[in-house]
């Protein structure tokens, strides 16, 4: 079965025009001024991995559109008893799901679900693969701050290897000709990452990535993800941590972004996290109108 119309499985195969349509529609979405485009619809949130921002903003987005939400987490559900992904999918469809939002540790899980269940499926993060709604809210945030993608340079710094956020961001930004520079040590920013999308460069040198940059996107560097890698966190901090002094290398009006959760003292200093150039909480806020647009599209209401 082909994925149902309105599914959002990744950014890679989404056309630039469709991305712009989504972003434009998101600008009309306001959770404080609800529009009940999804009145009475049931949004199933199927989370096989921890989440704070993504889950809560999908939930608030759905409710702001008048939908009901049901949250199913791996812990405490039949998933724990060994039920397969597809059987869980059939089950939530049988209880009446109109749309399924799924986060899963395996790349491709949302696609598998979408091939077997006849309702739109939205990928809320699948393994190391994609996190499309995050890329959309990041693009929304960039456009709100920079007005256009034209001539933009974006530096993405941190654990790119483990980051579905980085992959989706590269796919999205490259469709609009944005210069993308990935930066980190070889294990975290391997040169093969240049193949994610056209126009992506990789550098080991933070200065190189920051010079002339309009947007600094930081990524999480999580100890647990680094098992088996030769990463010395003290060395990482000394070479890549975003500090106020380093941020000065970027353009004067550069903004700092991070999908969260942030680790102060590792990826960035508190001074940067709470400084005037940071847009981290704005990103979280923008997650709501963006996901309202994603859900409205899923239900054919993006008009
Ligand atoms: C990220 C994720 O889960 O992919 N967070 C998010 O959804 N905002 C980033 C991460 O966990 O590194």
Image (spheres, rainbow, N blue to C red):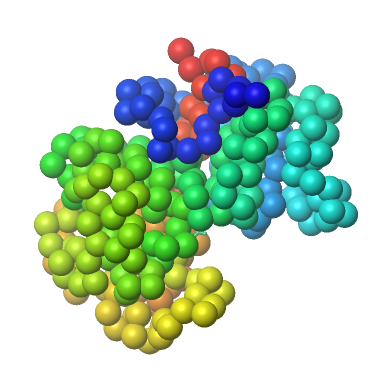
Residue 75 sits in quarter: bottom right
- The total number of labels drawn is 0
Residue nearest the observer in this picture, 274 or 176: 176
At horizontal 18% and vertical 63% (from top left) the residue drawn is: 210
From what the image shows, is residue 189 above or below residue 101? below
Residue nearest the observer in this picture, 98 or 195: 195
Horizontal and vertical percent position of residue 178: 21, 43
For this view, does 230 lie left or right of residue 211? right
Horizontal and vertical percent position of residue 225: 53, 71
Quarter of the image for the N terminus: give it: top right
At horizontal 42% and vertical 63% (from top left) the residue drawn is: 161
- Residue 242 at least partly seen: yes
At horizontal 49% and vertical 46% (from top left) the residue drawn is: 131
- Residue 56 at least partly seen: no
From what the image shows, is residue 196 above or below residue 189? above
Horizontal and vertical percent position of residue 105: 62, 55
Residue nearest the observer in this picture, 181 or 26: 181
Residue 249 sits in quarter: bottom left
Horizontal and vertical percent position of residue 29: 46, 26
Q: Residue furthest top?
A: 303
Residue nearest the observer in this picture, 19 or 214: 19
At horizontal 75% and vertical 50% (from top left) the residue drawn is: 73
């Amino acid at each position: 079965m082909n994925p149902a119309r309105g599914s959002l499985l990744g950014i890679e195969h989404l056309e630039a025009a469709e991305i712009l349509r989504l972003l434009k529609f998101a600008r009309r979405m306001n959770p404080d001024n609800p529009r009940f485009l999804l009145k009475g619809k049931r949004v199933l949130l199927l989370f096989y991995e921890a989440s704070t921002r993504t889950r809560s903003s999908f939930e608030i987005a759905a409710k702001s559109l008048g939908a009901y939400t049901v949250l199913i987490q791996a812990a405490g559900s039949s998933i724990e008893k060994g039920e397969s992904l597809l059987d869980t999918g059939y089950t939530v469809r049988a209880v009446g799901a109109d749309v399924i939002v799924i986060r899963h540790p395996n790349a491709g899980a949302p696609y598998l679900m979408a091939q077997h269940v006849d309702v739109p499926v939205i990928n809320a993060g699948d393994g190391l693969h994609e996190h499309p709604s995050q890329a959309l809210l990041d693009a929304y945030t960039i456009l709100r701050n920079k007005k256009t993608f034209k001539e933009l340079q974006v530096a993405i710094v941190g654990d790119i290897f483990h980051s579905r956020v980085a992959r989706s961001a590269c796919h999205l930004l490259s469709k609009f000709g944005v210069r993308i520079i990935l930066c980190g040590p070889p294990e975290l920013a391997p040169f093969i990452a240049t193949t994610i999308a056209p126009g992506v460069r990789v550098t080991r040198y933070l200065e190189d990535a920051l010079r002339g940059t309009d947007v600094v996107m930081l990524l999480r560097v999580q100890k647990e993800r680094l098992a088996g890698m030769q990463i010395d966190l003290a060395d990482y901090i000394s070479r890549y941590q975003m500090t106020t002094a380093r941020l000065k290398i970027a353009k004067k009006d550069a903004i700092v972004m991070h999908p969260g959760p942030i680790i102060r003292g590792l990826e960035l200093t508190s001074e940067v996290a709470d400084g005037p150039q940071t847009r981290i909480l704005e990103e979280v806020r923008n997650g709501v109108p963006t996901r309202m647009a994603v859900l409205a599209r899923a239900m054919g209401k993006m008009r």
